[in-house]
C-alpha cells in the first residue's frame, strides 16, 4: 500500500505537470486561436457587404473591399484615438455608453463603421451586439449609401436553441432583411423588427420572426435597434454635409455660368469697340482721299 504522503506528492506532481502542459499548449495555440477569430470576423464583415470569401483569401479581400474604417462618437462625429475600428470591442463601448447614461463614468464610447466598395457600390457596415434567449447575439448590418436600405446582414449566436433561435445564423433567414429600411417616410428612425405571424412582405420595416423562437426574435430586434441608433446622428450629420457640398457645387456652377455670361458680354463689347474703331479709321481714310 502507498502511504498518504506518497499519494499526495504523486497527485501534486501530476497536477503540476498537467497544468504546465495545458498552459504551454494554450500559449502555443493562442496565436492560432486569435487569427481564427480575426479571420472569422473579417469573413462576417465581408459577407454582410456581399463579398464571398474563404479563410485563405479573407484578409486579402478585406484590404481590397474595405476602403475605410471610422470611429463614430455618440454625437455623430468621426473621431480618432489611435485605434482601428476593427480592433474595437463593441461590448466595452456599449458598456461605456450605458455608464455615461447612468452617470457612472465619463469615458466616451466610440462605435466602429466599415465602408465597403464592391462593383461600384458603397456600403456602410455596422456591427451589432445584444442578447438572445440563452446568450449573446452579434453580427453586422450593411446599409446602402442612403443610410436607410439594408443591403445585407450576418448574425450569429452563442447558444440559442437548435432548430429555433439558432436559425438567426441561417442564410435563408438573413436574406429576409435585404431591402428593408430603418427610417420611415418622415425620416424617423424606426429600425427593423421581427414580427411574429405577420405578413411582412409589404412592410419595409418588418421581418418574419422565427417560428418557435419568439424570445430570440425579440432579442435580435432589440440588438439591431440598440446598435443602429448609435449611428443615427452620424447619418444626419453626413446627409447635411452632402447637402452642403451639393449646395456649394450648385453655387460654383451658378457663379461659373454668371462669369461665362459676363465674359461673353465683355467679349462682344470688345468686338463692337474694335468694329467701331475700324469704321472710324475707314471714315478718316475716305475723307483724306476725298481731300
Image (spheres, rainbow, N blue to C red):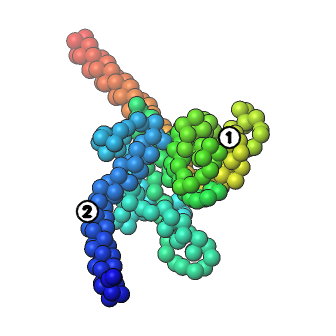
Residues 2 and 87: in front is 2
202 displayed left or right of 260: right
In percent of width and height, residue 201 lies at 71, 32
In percent of width and height, residue 208 lies at 70, 39
Give the residue displayed 36% in from the left and 87% down from the top.
Answer: 4
Can you say which quadrant of the picture contains the C terminus?
top left
Residues 190 and 15: in front is 15
Does residue 146 appear in the picture of this structure?
no
In percent of width and height, residue 8 lies at 34, 84
Does residue 3 appear in the picture of this structure?
yes
Quick one: label 2 or label 1, which is nearer the N terminus?
2
Give the residue displayed 50% in from the left and 53% down from the top.
Answer: 127
**Crowd band around label 1 with a 10 angstrom C-alpha radius: few (<14), some (14–19), many (20+):** many
Residues 39 and 224: in front is 39
**Which residue corresponds to mark 2?**
28
**Label disc, if present, on residue 207 of the rendered structure:** 1
Q: In the rendered image of this protein, does residue 34 appear above or below residue 271? A: below
Can you say which quadrant of the picture contains the N terminus?
bottom left
Give the secondary structure at mark 1.
strand
In percent of width and height, residue 148 lies at 59, 43
Q: In the rendered image of this protein, does residue 141 appear above or below residue 151? A: below
Q: In the rendered image of this protein, does residue 104 appear above or below residue 217? A: below
Distance CA(mark 2)–CA(mark 1): 44 Å
Give the residue displayed 56% in from the left and 54% down from the top.
Answer: 159
Most distant residue in the top direction: 290
**Crowd band around label 2 with a 10 angstrom C-alpha radius: few (<14), some (14–19), many (20+):** few
Amino acid at each position: 500500500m502507498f502511504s498518504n504522503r506518497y499519494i499526495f506528492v504523486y497527485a501534486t506532481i501530476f497536477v503540476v505537470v498537467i497544468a504546465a502542459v495545458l498552459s504551454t499548449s494554450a500559449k502555443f495555440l493562442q496565436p492560432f486561436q486569435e487569427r481564427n477569430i480575426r479571420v472569422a470576423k473579417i469573413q462576417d464583415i465581408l459577407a454582410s457587404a456581399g463579398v464571398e470569401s474563404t479563410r485563405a483569401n479573407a484578409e486579402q479581400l478585406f484590404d481590397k473591399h474595405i476602403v475605410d474604417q471610422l470611429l463614430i462618437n455618440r454625437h455623430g462625429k468621426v473621431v480618432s484615438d489611435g485605434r482601428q475600428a476593427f480592433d474595437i470591442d463593441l461590448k466595452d463601448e456599449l458598456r461605456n455608453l450605458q455608464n455615461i447614461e447612468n452617470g457612472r463614468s465619463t469615458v466616451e464610447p466610440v462605435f466602429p463603421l466599415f465602408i465597403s466598395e464592391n462593383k461600384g457600390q458603397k456600403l456602410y457596415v455596422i456591427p451589432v451586439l445584444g442578447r438572445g434567449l440563452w446568450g449573446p447575439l452579434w453580427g453586422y448590418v450593411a446599409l446602402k449609401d442612403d443610410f436607410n436600405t439594408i443591403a445585407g446582414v450576418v448574425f450569429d449566436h452563442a447558444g440559442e436553441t437548435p432548430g429555433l433561435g439558432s436559425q438567426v445564423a441561417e442564410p435563408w433567414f438573413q436574406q429576409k432583411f435585404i431591402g428593408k429600411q430603418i427610417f420611415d417616410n418622415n425620416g424617423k428612425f424606426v429600425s427593423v423588427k421581427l414580427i411574429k405571424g405577420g405578413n411582412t412582405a409589404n412592410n419595409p420595416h418588418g421581418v418574419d420572426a422565427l417560428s418557435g423562437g419568439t424570445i430570440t426574435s425579440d432579442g435580435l430586434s432589440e440588438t439591431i435597434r440598440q446598435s443602429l441608433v448609435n449611428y443615427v446622428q452620424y447619418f444626419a450629420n453626413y446627409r447635411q454635409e452632402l447637402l452642403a457640398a451639393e449646395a456649394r457645387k450648385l453655387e460654383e456652377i451658378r457663379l461659373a455660368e454668371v462669369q461665362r455670361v459676363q465674359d461673353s458680354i465683355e467679349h462682344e463689347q470688345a468686338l463692337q469697340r474694335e468694329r467701331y474703331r475700324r469704321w472710324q479709321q475707314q471714315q478718316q481714310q475716305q475723307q483724306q482721299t476725298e481731300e
